[in-house]
């Protein structure tokens, strides 16, 4: 698992970078929905933003898993990526999707992602004892998913606000993790084997 992550640190960095961009987009677009006639456009924009974020995140994770195929436990990453892509496809293909349905899909996706990220973080800490970025990302996903499940926002603007916060936090944690993993590439080969 750790070798896959170290080898593909740049994919995690790209995933984090896109999450930051989507977070900024969500924040900027939430101010554009004051007029009632723009609410349908805002909802469509929210759906597209989430779908893009989930699909790109899933695609990068699947790529990292497949390029590390043959290494034990690579399927954790593959499952994470597939579920993200499925969530993206679901929100784009469900006919007559409502805000409540969208919030439930996003919440379920975030909770599943939090479980997979936490499992991966636990395995990662066997190799990097002071690594906390992925665990923080998992905690953020859990808080985000739990909030949407039990106290979900009642309007598009609130949903965009929470999606923006989540995207920025998740993106920052992924970039921090990627940079930490990148630093492990320069270890002496014997040290790398021991660390991995």
Image (spheres, rainbow, N blue to C red):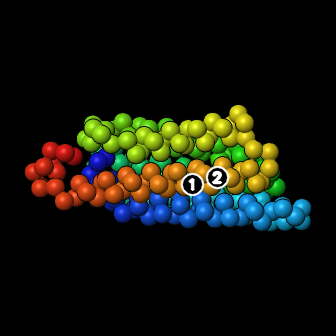
- CA separation in Å, label 2 and label 1: 6 Å
Residue 85's x, y, as percent?
56, 56
Tell me the residue at 75%/62% (across/down).
31
Q: Residues within 10 Å of mark 2 (few under 14, many from 20)?
A: many
Q: How many marks?
A: 2
Q: Secondary structure at mark 2?
A: helix
Tell me the residue at 29%/58% (across/down).
182
Front-most of residues 105 and 40: 40
Q: Residues within 10 Å of mark 1 (few under 14, many from 20)?
A: many
Q: Which residue is mark 2?
A: 163
- Mark 2 in CB contact with mark 1 (< 8 angstroms): yes
Q: Residue furthest right?
A: 36
- Hey, which quadrant is residue 62 in on the image? bottom left
Residue 48's x, y, as percent?
68, 63
Q: Which residue is mark 1?
A: 167
Tell me the residue at 82%/55% (across/down).
96
Drawn side of residue 25 relative to residue 196, left or right: right
Residue 11's x, y, as percent?
40, 62
- Hey, which quadrant is residue 54 in on the image? bottom right
Tell me the residue at 89%/61% (across/down).
36
Drawn side of residue 161 relative to residue 142, left or right: right
Front-most of residues 115 and 70: 115
Residue 104 appears in the picture as rendered:
yes
Residue 63 appears in the picture as rendered:
no
Kindly identify which numbered label has been placed on residue 80: none
Q: 7 above or below 136?
A: below
Q: Residue furthest top?
A: 150
Residue 168's x, y, as percent?
55, 55
Q: Secondary structure at mark 1?
A: helix
């Amino acid at each position: 698992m750790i070798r896959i992550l170290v080898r593909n640190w740049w994919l995690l960095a790209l995933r984090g970078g896109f999450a930051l961009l989507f977070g900024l987009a969500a924040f900027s677009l939430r101010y554009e929905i004051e007029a009632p006639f723009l609410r349908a456009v805002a909802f469509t924009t929210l759906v597209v933003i989430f779908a893009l974020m989930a699909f790109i995140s899933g695609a990068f994770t699947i790529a990292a898993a497949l390029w590390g195929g043959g290494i034990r436990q690579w399927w954790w990453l593959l499952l994470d990526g597939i579920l993200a892509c499925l969530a993206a496809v679901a929100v784009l293909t469900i006919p007559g999707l409502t805000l409540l349905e969208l919030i439930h899909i996003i919440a379920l996706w975030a909770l599943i992602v939090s479980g997979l990220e936490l499992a991966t973080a636990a395995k990662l800490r066997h190799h990097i004892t002071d690594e906390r970025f992925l665990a923080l990302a998992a905690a953020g996903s859990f808080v985000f998913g739990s909030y949407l499940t039990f106290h979900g926002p009642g309007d598009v603007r609130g949903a965009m606000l929470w999606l923006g916060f989540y995207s920025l936090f998740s993106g920052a944690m992924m970039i921090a993790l990627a940079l930490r993993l990148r630093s492990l590439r320069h270890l002496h080969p014997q040290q790398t084997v021991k660390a991995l």
